[in-house]
Image (spheres, rainbow, N blue to C red):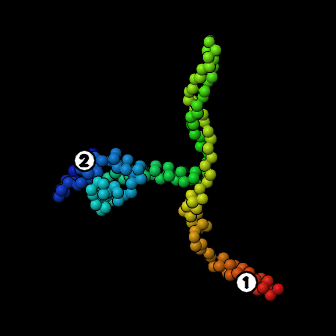
Amino acid sequence: MVVYMANKVGRKSNYYTLVEPNLKIIEYWCRDGAIDEEIWNRLGISKTSFYKYQNEHEEFANALKKEKELVDYSVEDSLLMSARGHVKELRKPFKLKEVYYDDKGKRCENERVAYGIEEVYYPPVPLSIIYWLKNRMKGKWRDKPVFSDEEKETIEKLDKILESLDNQAGDE
């Protein structure tokens, strides 16, 4: 859809020559995990134009948003499966050998490949668990926890109690 603005002076926007004809390709790039910077570089437009076009052209903004969300959800599902562990059914080939005797008593063999289903357990991946907890439960699972003033006082009291117990144990 080409929109011409009346009384507008200047050259025609690059949107209609560089972006609009490539909307489907842009969707594929997003699905492949391309970030905004990669997209504007591939299109040959500036960062400013990229965000301007996103604000002015709903079909461009939707193409970016829809495909990025699909990929994000897919990756999130994979990370969760990795953190939880899961069972997957695999189709495995195996060889079947049939032994029989013909009319003359000669031993004959017939081989064929058949497929069976094997359930394989993939245990949780500790790194996935750590990543999930640090990003989804930041307050509880950060490298340097943040304590309230009340919690700090309690920790100080416990440290003093432990120190006094260590001193008593050392005196004995």
Quadrant for the C terminus in the image: bottom right
Q: Residue furthest top?
A: 103
Q: Which mark is residue 163?
A: 1
> Taking 34 as reference, is 128 left or right?
right
User: Where in the figure is residue 148, as x and y percent of width and height?
Assistant: 62, 76
Quadrant for the N terminus in the image: top left
Asked whether residue 65 is in view, the answer is no
User: Where in the figure is residue 67, as x and y percent of width and height?
Assistant: 42, 49
Q: Residue furthest right?
A: 172
Q: Residue at x 52, y 53 (%)?
A: 76
> Taking 104 as reference, is 20 left or right?
left
Q: Are marks 2 and 1 in contact (CB under 8 Å)?
A: no
Q: Residue at x 58, y 73 (%)?
A: 144
Asked whether residue 26 is in view, the answer is yes
Q: Which kind of residue does numbered mark 2 sit on?
A: Val
**Circle 1 sits in a helix, a strand or a loop, which is it?**
helix
Q: Residue at x 57, y 26 (%)?
A: 111
Q: Which residue is mark 2?
A: 2
**Circle 2 sits in a helix, a strand or a loop, which is it?**
loop
In the image, is residue 20 above or below residue 114? below
Between 24 and 97, the residue placed more toward the observer is: 97
User: Where in the figure is residue 163, as x and y percent of width and height?
Assistant: 73, 83
User: Where in the figure is residue 130, as x and y percent of width and height?
Assistant: 58, 62
